[in-house]
Image (spheres, rainbow, N blue to C red):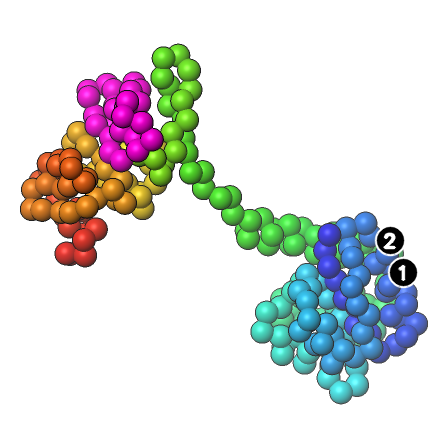
Amino acid sequence: MIKCIAIDDEPLALDLLEDNIGMVPYLQLIGKCNNAFEAMEILRQQPVDLIFLDIQMPGLTGLQFLESLPHKPIVILITAYEKYALEGFNLAVTDYLVKPVSLERFIKACNKAQELFLLRTAGKTTKEPADFFFVNVDYSLHKVVFADIIWIEGLKDYVKIHLRSTSKPVITRMSIKGMEEQLPGTKFIRIHKSYIVAVAAISSIRKNSISLDSLELPVGDTYRDSVYAIAGKM
């Protein structure tokens, strides 16, 4: 639902606006305001997606109110005057309706607002990254959790995934480069043409090797700078 407020100093116009909003199924009217100051109070208390805004109002005009907003919702101007259209669109309003407004024209403006709302919300929606992946093991898919991995060893066309939870490594047919592409770069680092390690598992770093508790692995020349960068040595 698109949460909206209606602002108009004329009671009859405000009631008509409320009726029109009630006919649009994706709109939820959360407030009716006779002036911009009442609208400011609503905006202070809760988020609003869309404002239906009159221009000529006492105290603070609709355009002055719009200019004062640090974070502008979607705005549809509804006014009796055509002369403010250019100024309104310079303030990036979504539509400009001149009273009296037909229901058809009102719904058309609402549809434009809905399209913009969906674009904005789609941009804000981020998918949480998965904390696992699947590999082929013995003709089945085996789930591997990133946090369970200590290090990975490349063996030509196969890799061995060494885990915290078991002494038996997971072996899957994949190149180490292909495995590297599956892993989040913030949590794993390639240290050698044959080795990838979990950054959290590194206990110490030397010039030509790293230690994972009791295990020591060589650092290849190609990867040394990346390894030192982890330790803040760059």
Q: Residue at the spot x=14%, y=42% of the render? A: 210
- Mark yes or no: residue 36 visible: no
173 or 77, nearer to the observer? 173
Q: Real-space Cα distance between discs 1 and 2?
A: 7 Å
List the single residue furthest toward the right. 12
State yes or no: residue 189 in magenta. no
Question: In the rendering, which numbered label is found on residue 19?
Answer: 1
- The answer to whether residue 143 is left or right of residue 208 is right
Q: For mark 1, does the 10 Å Cα neighbourhood hold few (<14), some (14 to 19), or many (20 or more) residues?
A: few
Q: Is residue 170 magenta?
A: yes
Check the image and name the residue furthest to the left: 207
Relative height, residue 186 to residue 141 (above, below): below
For the residue labelled by badge 2, is the local secondary structure a helix, a strand or a loop?
A: loop
Give the quadrant of residue 223. Answer: top left
Q: Residue at x 63, y 71 (%)?
A: 91
With respect to residue 114, does 153 lie above or below? above
Q: Nearer the viewer, residue 18 or 135?
A: 135
Q: Helix, strand, or loop for circle 1?
A: helix
Residue 126 is situated, as x and y percent measured from the top left of the image, at 51, 47
Quadrant in which the C terminus appears: bottom left
Numbered tag placed on residue 92 in the rendering: none
| Amino acid bearing label 1 | Asp
Residue identifier under label 2: 23
Q: Residues within 10 Å of mark 2 (few under 14, many from 20)?
A: few
Q: Position of residue 203 (x, y in %)?
A: 19, 46
The percent position of residue 45, horizontal first and vertical second, equals: 68, 71
Query: What's the residue at 24%, 30% (across, down)?
Result: 152
The boundaries of the magenta stretch are 150-178
Q: Are marks 1 and 2 in contact (CB under 8 Å)?
A: yes
Mark 2: which amino acid?
Met
